[in-house]
Amino acid sequence: MATAQDLDLVEISPNADPPVCKIIDYKKFLYEQKKKQKELKAKQQKVVVKEIRFGPNTDEHDFTFKLNHAKKFLEEGSKLKVYVFFKGRTIVYKDRGEILLLKFAQELTDDAVVEQMPAMNGKKMIMTFAPKKKK
């Protein structure tokens, strides 16, 4: 029947009893599947991670400036990675870095959810945030 219609006989469900087969144009079937996959991929949201870098001795003005940038990033729906970078002998001031990050988290309580609390990773103390869900 398939050759008479110039189509292909395709096994749909081999585990069924009896096995299910369909007479279709196999190339067209593959094309449509590929098209559906592409459409699903286009609908997916890509996670963007923005980074903000501090030093352990960051002043108040720089702090508020970067805080405003962070709020803008979170409004866009991006995730946020905030870190304090310790250069040379500043590694002694780990407590200042942690206080800075916790203060930053306190300021962002209305806009973001903390994903990861401050943790040392080499010469960096890293903290990550995710935007709060909008109602």
Image (tube, rainbow, N blue to C red):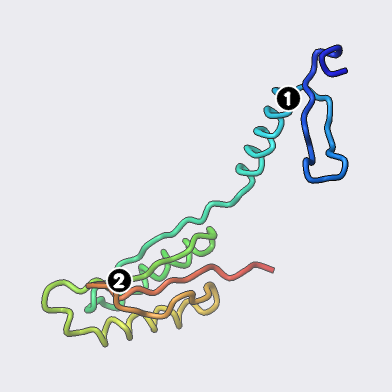
Could you tell me residue 25's position as x and y percent?
77, 22
- Give the position of the C terminus as an image quadrant: bottom right
What amino acid type is highlighted by mark number 2? Asp
Front residue of this view, candidates 131 and 71: 131
Q: Residue at x 48, y 74 (%)?
A: 115
From this view, report whether residue 67 is shown above or below residue 39: below
Residue at 30 percent of width and 76 percent of height: 125
The reply to whether the C-beta atoms of the residues labelled 2 and 1 are less than 8 Å apart is no
Identify the disc placed on residue 26.
1
* Mark closer to the chain start, 2 or 1: 1
Q: Quadrant of the N terminus?
A: top right
Q: Secondary structure at mark 2?
A: helix
Measured Cα–Cα span from mark 2 to mark 1? 62 Å
On the picture, is 107 further left or further right than 57? right
Name the spot of residue 20 as percent of width and height, x first. Answer: 84, 37
Question: Is 128 left, or right, of 77 in this rendering?
Answer: left
Disc 1 crowd, CA 10 A, few/some/many (<14, 14-19, 20+):
some
Q: Which mark is residue 62?
A: 2
Residue 111 screen position, x and y as percent: 54, 72
Is residue 100 found left or right of 106 in the rendered image?
A: left
Quarter residue 96 falls in: bottom left
Which residue is at a point 40% across and 78% down the rendered structure image?
Answer: 104
Residue at (83%, 18%) from the top-left corner?
2
Q: Amino acid at mark 1?
A: Tyr
Query: What is the x, y in percent for residue 63?
Result: 33, 74
- Give the structural element (helix, strand or loop) at label 1: helix
